[in-house]
Image (cartoon, grey):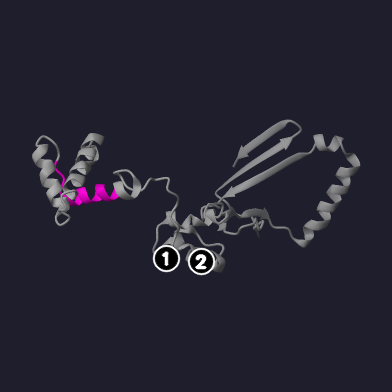
Amino acid sequence: MANNLTNPEYFDMVGVVYEISQRNQQRGLYSEAARVYADRNPERYHPDRRFFARIHGNALAYGNFAGPPRNAGPRENPNTDAILAAVAANPQTSTRTIAGDLDISKTAVHVLKKNEYKPYKIHIHQELTEEDFYPRLEYCLWSLQRAPVSVRRTMHSDECTFRSDGTVNRHNSHYWPIENPHWMRERQMQDRFSVNTWCGIIDEYVVKSIF
């Protein structure tokens, strides 16, 4: 009910408080103010002495009845040092893990972004072996000899393997630094899979397939 009070009601309540205070009745001030307000306004909501004390204090401290304004500025996070220390010890940790270890909310952990930390995701690249070097070199030399005709006749493709073990999911693979570390991991992607998607581009045409 207190949330539905109008400004005139708030003003009348504080007015009663000031009226009682002028009589030098500081002892029991808010209890007396609550009683006088109820007698004068029988049709209104009658809050207790604690409500009168709260709105009076807010009016003196903040110039309003609701309390400190929401745009008064962000509060300093007391766990900032502990959060930054957790990231320094393990840059691959997650906000959920930090929140659980420090017994704080996940929202509090986002102080990392205020300190210019970013959650860079890992990039998965096809693993190259020693046998791959010379075929790649030969192809580059051949392509240079036929450029620019070969560029329009060369298909550029990429593929992604979705496996049942979820290794394609990079959502939880983060690295928390201030500068991009270009974090990569080599792995063999052309192995057994459940679903494989492939896309190729040749000249101005796009070819897709799922198999």
**Amino acid type at image mark 1:** Leu
Q: Which residues are magenta?
A: 46-58
Looking at the rendered image, the quarter that the N terminus falls into is top left
Give the main secondary structure, helix, strand or loop, of the magenta stretch.
Answer: helix
Secondary structure found at label 2:
helix
Name above or below for residue 16 compared with residue 90.
above
Q: Residue at x 45, y 63 (%)?
A: 79
Q: Circle 2: is it few (<14), some (14-19), or many (20+) Cα within 10 Å?
A: some
- Give the number of marks: 2
Q: Is residue 193 left or right of residue 72?
A: right
Question: Which dot marks residue 86?
Answer: 2
Q: Report x, y in % for residue 17.
A: 19, 46
Q: Quadrant of residue 130?
A: bottom right
Which residue is drawn at the image coordinates 63% and 53% (left, top)? 123
Q: Where residue 89 sits in the image (x, y, percent)?
A: 55, 69
Task: Report how far apart the C-alphas of labels 2 and 1 lie in the structure.
Answer: 9 Å
Q: Quickly name the residue at label 1.
A: 102
In terms of depth relative to the viewer, which is nearer, 86 or 161? 86
Report the amino acid beneath label 2: Ala
| Disc 2 to disc 1: CB gap under 8 Å | yes
- Sequence-first tag of 2 and 1: 2
Query: Is 197 a magenta residue?
Result: no
